[in-house]
Amino acid sequence: MSTKITIAIDGYSACGKSTLAKALAKALDYSFIDSGAMYRGASLFFHRLGYVSEKHIDREAIENAIKDLKLCFKIDNAKNCLYLHNENIEDEIRQAHVANIVSKVATIKAVRVALVKQQQRMGQNGGIVMDGRDIGSIVFPNAQLKLFVTASPEIRAQRRFAELQEKGIPQSLEEVRSNLTKRDHVDSTREESPLIQVKDAIVLDNSTLTKKEQLEWVLEKAKTIIRSNH
Ligand code: DC
């Protein structure tokens, strides 16, 4: 029997889920999937088609076009990057024009059904760490390890602001704060697969933890489960 487990990491925007998931996958030699990047990629695709902007959304057009969306991850310069058809969109999906529409696009059931199907295919053999909002509840309800990551809103805003600055993406701290508040609200109150803390998830509040401390904490939990699965 395979001893490779499935690890689901959910939580609010900008609480360090992807950083933790990536480090955990590396330490275990598992694959890592940032499901938020896929919702961002879908949003960029529909934005370019003119179906969604900050002011409007054409749900019917999006439902009809979802079959044409082709997203995949490829390694580029030793970095896991999201591709839309043949274009590396990893940088563009982090920009404000995508961040400001992604929560809206993620409320559309047809979009969620298509992306969840692709995510489940990616994880069918285990050995995966996936982060998002519905991973422990919908995508991998049988994941052997589920985490719910959280941190104070101000710390999350500061962290995301620093990250964007480092990447040279211009956004003020106030804009980042406002975007996070709006996304938290939409993500946790939407009808389709809202962000919830499932009963069997372990809560990790990382407000005062370093990246290294978080990784050690989670790695210990993962290794215990892997050993008991042996
Ligand atoms: O993790 P992130 O901030 O890059 O996610 C971007 C948006 O995508 C977020 O506002 C909610 C949505 N999302 C989702 O609905 N379900 C997921 N599994 C991952 C992200």
Image: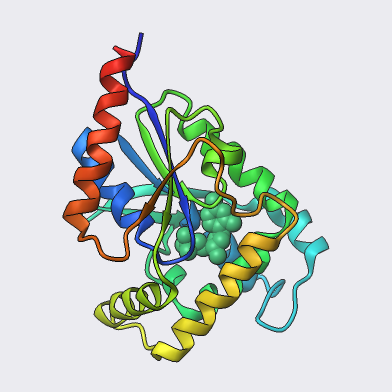
- Nearest to the observer: residue 28 or residue 203: 203
Q: Position of residue 183 (x, y in %)?
A: 57, 71
**Furthest residue in direction right, as rendered:** 60
- Nearest to the observer: residue 140 or residue 50: 140
- Nearest to the observer: residue 90 or residue 85: 90
Instruction: Answer yes or no: is residue 27 visible.
Output: yes
Q: Quadrant of residue 24?
A: top left
Q: Position of residue 59 (x, y in %)?
A: 79, 64
Instruction: Answer yes or no: is residue 40 visible.
Output: no
Q: Residue at x 47, y 50 (%)?
A: 10
Q: Is residue 66 above or below residue 173?
A: above
Say which quadrant the N terminus sits in. Answer: top left
Q: Residue at x 24, y 51 (%)?
A: 214
Say which quadrant the C terminus sits in. Answer: top left
Q: Position of residue 110 (x, y in %)?
A: 73, 50
Q: Residue at x 47, y 55 (%)?
A: 11
Q: Position of residue 29 (x, y in %)?
A: 23, 33
- Nearest to the observer: residue 42 or residue 4: 4
Q: Residue at x 32, y 59 (%)?
A: 206
Counting the numbered discs, the total is 0
Colour pattern of the rendering: rainbow
Query: Horizontally, is 170 left or right of 112 in the view?
Result: left
Query: Horizontally, is 16 left or right of 144 in the view?
Result: left
